[in-house]
C-alpha cells in the first residue's frame, strides 16, 4: 500500500467540486472547522486511492460521519481502517476485525473505475427503471405489471389495455383490483416511493388515509415515475412478519467466463412495525439465505441510520410476531435459482448483477436490477472476497 499523501491548501483551493460538495455536506450537518478538515482529508484519500471521481463525495461524507460517530472503535484506531477503505461501522455490522478485514471488499476497490461496466451504453440499461423493464421483456412473468409511465403528470400506457394516454379514473379503477406502487425511474433506497391502495370507501397513501382527490393530485405531481402493481409478499412472510410488512430478496450473480452463471449471495430484508415501507433503514431485519437450501440464517435488526452509521442487533424471533425466523425457508427456492441464473446468462455482457426481488404467493417479482449494486447489507452473511467468482468479476487487493 502506497504511503498516504496529505492534502494541502492548494488541493483545496483548486478543487471546485470538492468545495461545492463540502458546502452541501456542512449544510446538512454542523459547520465547524474540524468536520470540514476531516471531510477534505477523506475526499483526498478517495482521490489518492483511485476511487472513481463521482464517488469522492460519498466517501468523504460517509467517513466523516463515521469519524464523529461512536462506532465502538477507539478514535486512534479509526485511521488504520480508513487508510484501507473501511469505515469503522463495518466492524460491528460485519464482524470485521484487523485479522479478517481482507475477506471483505475495500471501498477503494468497490469504487474503482476498473470495477464498473466499461461500456456506458450498458450501464444505461439499469440506471432507469423503465429501460430495465424493456431489457427484461422476455422475463416479464417475473416482474410486477407495469401499467403506466408517468411523464410530467401524464399517464403513458405501458402494459395496460388502452390505445390512449391514461386518465385518473383509469388508475382509480386499477386500485379496485389491488394496491399499486409508484417508483421513481432513477435513484434507489426507496426514495420517493408511494404505495397507494383502496380501502373501504377511501384510499391510503403510504398507509395514511386519503381521498380520491389526493391520489389524483399525487399522480399529477410526478415525473419520471412508473406505476406498477404492488408486490405482496408470500404468505410465509406475511405470517412471520405481519400482513403489511415487506419481504425483499437481494441476489448477487456473476456470469463467469468459464463456468457460466453463478449465484454468490442472497439476502432477505424483512419489515417490522417500525421499519415503514422501505427496506434500507432502521427497523429492517436483514438475514442471509442459504444458497443450497433457501433457509434463512443469522437475522440482524438494523439500526444507527440516524447517526450516519449502521448497527446490528442479533435476534432469533420477529419482534412483532414472535416467529422463529431461522425456521423460514424461501418458497419456490429452486425457481428463484433458475430465474436468477437465466437472467445472468441473458445479460452475460453485464457479468455482475444485483437484483431486488419480492417472493410472492405465485413466484417472484423483480423490483430492480443493478450492474454495480452495493454488497454492504450482504457482507455480514457472505464476505465478498471469500467467493472465487466475485474475485474473478472484480479486481481487488489485499490491504
Image (cartoon, rainbow, N blue to C red):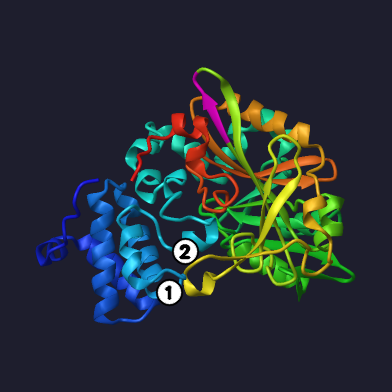
The answer to whether residue 388 is left or right of residue 182 is: left
Image x and y of residue 149, in percent: 62, 48
Find out whether the residues at labels 2 and 1 contact each other: C-beta distance under 8 Å: yes
Say which label, 2 or 1, has the lower sequence index: 1
Residue occupying the far left of the picture:
10
Magenta range is 253-257
> Can you tell which mark lies on residue 69?
1
Q: Nearer the viewer, residue 237 or 366?
A: 237
Image x and y of residue 159, in percent: 72, 40
Residue that numbered label 2 is attached to: 89
The answer to whether residue 128 is left or right of residue 67 is: right
Q: Is residue 47 above or below residue 71?
A: above
Image x and y of residue 70, in percent: 45, 75
Q: Residue at x 62, y 61 (%)?
A: 193
Q: Nearer the viewer, residue 333 or 91?
A: 91
Residue occupying the far top of the picture:
258
Label 1: which secondary element: loop
Amino acid at each position: 500500500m502506497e504511503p498516504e499523501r496529505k492534502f494541502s491548501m492548494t488541493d483545496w483551493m483548486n478543487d471546485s467540486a470538492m468545495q461545492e460538495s463540502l458546502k452541501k455536506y456542512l449544510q446538512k450537518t454542523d459547520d465547524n472547522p474540524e468536520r470540514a478538515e476531516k471531510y477534505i482529508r477523506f475526499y483526498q484519500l478517495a482521490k489518492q486511492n483511485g476511487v472513481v471521481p463521482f464517488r469522492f463525495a460519498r466517501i468523504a461524507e460517509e467517513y466523516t460521519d463515521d469519524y464523529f460517530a461512536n462506532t465502538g472503535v477507539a478514535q486512534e484506531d479509526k485511521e488504520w481502517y480508513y487508510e484501507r477503505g473501511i469505515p469503522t461501522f463495518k466492524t460491528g455490522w460485519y464482524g470485521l476485525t484487523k485479522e479478517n478485514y481482507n475477506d471483505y471488499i475495500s471501498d477503494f476497490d468497490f469504487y474503482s473505475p476498473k470495477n464498473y461496466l466499461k461500456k456506458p451504453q450498458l450501464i444505461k440499461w439499469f440506471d432507469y427503471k423503465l429501460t430495465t423493464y424493456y431489457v427484461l421483456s422476455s422475463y416479464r412473468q417475473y416482474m410486477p405489471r407495469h401499467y403506466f409511465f408517468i411523464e410530467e403528470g401524464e399517464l403513458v400506457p405501458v402494459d395496460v389495455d388502452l390505445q390512449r394516454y391514461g386518465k385518473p379514473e383509469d388508475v382509480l379503477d386499477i386500485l379496485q383490483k389491488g394496491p399499486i406502487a409508484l417508483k421513481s425511474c432513477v435513484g434507489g433506497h426507496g426514495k420517493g416511493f408511494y404505495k397507494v391502495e383502496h380501502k373501504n370507501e377511501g384510499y391510503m397513501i403510504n398507509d395514511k388515509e386519503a381521498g380520491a382527490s389526493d391520489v389524483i393530485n399525487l399522480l399529477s405531481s410526478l415525473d419520471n415515475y412508473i406505476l406498477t402493481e404492488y408486490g405482496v409478499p408470500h404468505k410465509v412472510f406475511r405470517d412471520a412478519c405481519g400482513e403489511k410488512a415487506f419481504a425483499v430478496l437481494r441476489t448477487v450473480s456473476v456470469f463467469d467466463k468459464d463456468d457460466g452463471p453463478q449465484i454468490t449471495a442472497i439476502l432477505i430484508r424483512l419489515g417490522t412495525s417500525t421499519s415503514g415501507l422501505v427496506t434500507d433503514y432502521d427497523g429492517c431485519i436483514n438475514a442471509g439465505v442459504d444458497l443450497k437450501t433457501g433457509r434463512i440464517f443469522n437475522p440482524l435488526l438494523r439500526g444507527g441510520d440516524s447517526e450516519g452509521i449502521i448497527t446490528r442487533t442479533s435476534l432469533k424471533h420477529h419482534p412483532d410476531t414472535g416467529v422463529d425466523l431461522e425456521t423460514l425457508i424461501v418458497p419456490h427456492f429452486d425457481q428463484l435459482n433458475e430465474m436468477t441464473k437465466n437472467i445472468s446468462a441473458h445479460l452475460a455482457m453485464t457479468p455482475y448483477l444485483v437484483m431486488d426481488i419480492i417472493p410472492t404467493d405465485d413466484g417472484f417479482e423483480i423490483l430492480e436490477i443493478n450492474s454495480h449494486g452495493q454488497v454492504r447489507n450482504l457482507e455480514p452473511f457472505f464476505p465478498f472476497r471469500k467467493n472465487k467468482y466475485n474475485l474473478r468479476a472484480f479486481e481487488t487487493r489485499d490491504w
